[in-house]
Image: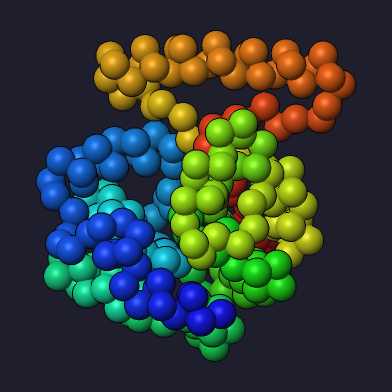
Amino acid sequence: MKYRNIWNEKYTEYQNKETSPPGLEEIQRYRQVYSYYLRQWFPEKKDAPVLEVACGSGLFLNLLRENGYSQAFGLDSSPQQIALAQQQGFNVEQANALEFLKNESKHFQTIVALDFIEHLYKDEALDFLHSSFNRLEPGGRIILQTPNGESPWVGSVFHGDLTHEVCYTPHLLEKLLRQAGFESIKFRPCGPPPIDFISTSRKFIWDGMTMVCRLLNIIEGAVSSGIYTRVFMISGIKPG
């Protein structure tokens, strides 16, 4: 696992080529896109404790702050990422996510891990899901985003990061969430969001491409989730 230490130590420099906090334009675009992706998945109460695993430079934490969530906390294993998040005043900690979730006594209403689970080995992924389940309050939600093994174009995303280990399909990750105890599992594509005229036009074209992919699966007789974007999101609820 030596490559993990080498790559994660300067992840922002090697992978994302980031040396400063995100700019206003990037923050605004992210806010528009992910407000749509995460619609109806945000906690109802603004003081709900929210944990972001692998918070990076703080784009999602910024979205939470702009929406009035006062109890958001982030963690990341990369010291560079944590430094960028701290520059923006976020409550973050440099930590190993698996160790944190096993040792932390606090419970959260929502745990978010965007582009994280694909970096884990299979045993680690199961540990992560079970530990997340234990750290959630009854009725709490887990939200994941990961490369989509069902997408014909996933290779450019999954093989574009040295530390990616496992590529999931929506149905496989659904099974893992159920095995960990989660219910009411839903997944969503991460395609063009209808936030302006251009992106709405792109979504219309993309929906047509999705229908073609579905038709090809029907012709073959294959079982498909119907999601073909390069990455997808999935959410599960802890019963209670």
Which corner quadrant of the image does residue 137 belong to? bottom right
Q: For the C terminus, which image quadrant?
A: bottom right
Give x and y (percent) for residue 145: 52, 49
Number of disc labels: 0
Residue 223 in view here: yes
Q: In the image, is residue 148 above or below residue 236?
A: above
Q: Which residue is drawn at 64% across and 52% down?
A: 167
State the residue in front, 132 or 30. 30
User: Along the horizontal axis of the image, is 83 left or right of 213?
Assistant: left
Which corner quadrant of the image does residue 122 belong to? bottom right
Give x and y (percent) for residue 215: 72, 13
Q: In the image, is residue 105 above or below residue 203?
A: below
User: Along the horizontal axis of the image, is 178 left or right of 98?
Assistant: right
Residue 232 in view here: no
State the residue in front, 47 or 164. 164
Q: Residue at x 37, y 41 (%)?
A: 34
Give x and y (percent) for residue 195: 31, 24
Q: Which residue is drawn at 30% across and 78% down?
A: 79
State the residue in front, 227 or 195. 227
State the residue in front, 177 or 22. 22
User: Along the horizontal axis of the image, is 221 left or right of 124?
Assistant: right
Q: In the image, is residue 219 above or below residue 64?
A: above
Give x and y (percent) for residue 129: 65, 66
